[in-house]
Amino acid sequence: MGDKIYSKAGGLPRVKLSHAPAGPNAFKRMIDTADRAEPGQLVAVYDKNGNPYGTAIYNPRSQITLRIVSRENPDEFSVEKFLDEKVSRAVSLRRGVLRLPERTDAYRLVHDYADGLPGLTADIYKDQIVLEFYSLGMYRLWPAIQAAFKKQFPEAVFHHRASAYTQEMEGFSIKPEAAASHKTRISENGVQFELDLKAGYKTGFFCDQRENRLYASSLAAGRRMLDICAYTGGFGVYAAKLGGASEVTCVELDPEASALSRRNANINRVSVDAVCADAFTYMRQMLEQKRRYGLVVLDPYKLVSSREEREKGIFKYRDFNRLALSLVEEGGVFVTCSCSGMVSMEEFSFILRGAASNTGRRVQILKKAGAGPDHPVAADYPEGEYLKCIFCRVF
């Protein structure tokens, strides 16, 4: 928490733009000059005419050189006030408007750009808050971020996470916490899940699929259900406990996640067949055995994470959907998902259409959905609308 981060704008390094960005990010080609600015610092930003433009997080080694956090005059900027206001507003949305604590104790508290804190997401699991960092600047601000959250959640315990890719690209390192695991149990819509805050993907659980899990369960009654890329069994356990599925199989390659899906089924006193296997191999085996399911959910990991991986990822989505569609019985339900922000809903719908054509199936789209409302999207940052979920009936 050095002076370089917390100075009033009068002491902040100055960055001058060559031209203004359309959204909240400025890339290297948009920067004219950067006076005394170091990676991870807050900087005062001015337009090409020298007029105040705002305050931003600066990192010249990142693809996103400036993440603009405020459009107010940088001379008036106070990071403590800024964080207090943003965190308070974000918590107010979840508590007062969405009233999430009435039906769950696990939800997203801060969603990146949409909550005015680019480079940060925060999820709460009971009294545990997991901060996931996507930028060096936000990571350097973690003491002030936690102080702002403490005003809203005095008893909170904090955990820090960032992917290895982010740490390498942004230039920081998060030291592993002392304990090997930290398990907690959460509840959403009456369904309980155990999660390990030190393991797994993202912050340990996928709160973004909450509403989609619930809707899918409403289509499960009496059906044999296959949950592909099940992670810790979210869709499958919902279908068994709330939906009345006659049989549930959860397929997941990660052995720890697969074991946890079995554990989550036991916690909810339902029966789930947790299969630890490669999804492609398993689906092909089921096709050879002529197995069919009344409800198939396909929720793979992020297949397109960069422009370089785009073509390969699109091919995988096509192959995944082609195989999964073939396993749906006549008149059955297919739920297909993508969490790749670089794949639009329009493009994902086109992938589904191609898979239907290749398999000779007729698909009725019942509903298209995204992440839950605790994952809002900023109007000037449509890339934040990353999750796509399409519910279909198949003939």
Image: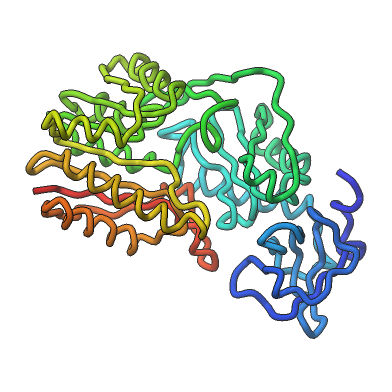
Q: Residue at x 71, y 50 (%)?
A: 170
Quick one: quadrant of the N terminus?
Answer: top right
* Residue 228 location, quadrant: top left
- Position in image of residue 204 (x %, y %): 52, 31
Q: Relative to residue 153, is residue 183 depicted above or below?
A: above
Asked if one can make out residue 190 in the rendered structure from this viewpoint, the answer is no
Q: Residue at x 54, y 19 (%)?
A: 183
Q: How is the image coloured?
A: rainbow
Position of 300 with respect to 25 (left or right) is left
Asked if one can make out residue 94 in the rendered structure from this viewpoint, the answer is yes
**Depth order, front residue of 308/129:** 308
**Depth order, front residue of 375/346:** 346
**Depth order, front residue of 113/355:** 355
- Position in image of residue 285 (x %, y %): 21, 30
**Depth order, front residue of 27/208:** 27
Q: Residue furthest bottom?
A: 49
Q: Residue at x 70, y 38 (%)?
A: 151
- Position in image of residue 171 (x %, y %): 75, 47
Q: How many marks?
A: 0
- Position in image of residue 310 (x %, y %): 45, 57
Q: Residue at x 82, y 67 (%)?
A: 44
Q: Relative to residue 385, is residue 26 depicted above or below?
A: below
Position of 289 with respect to 369 (left or right) is left
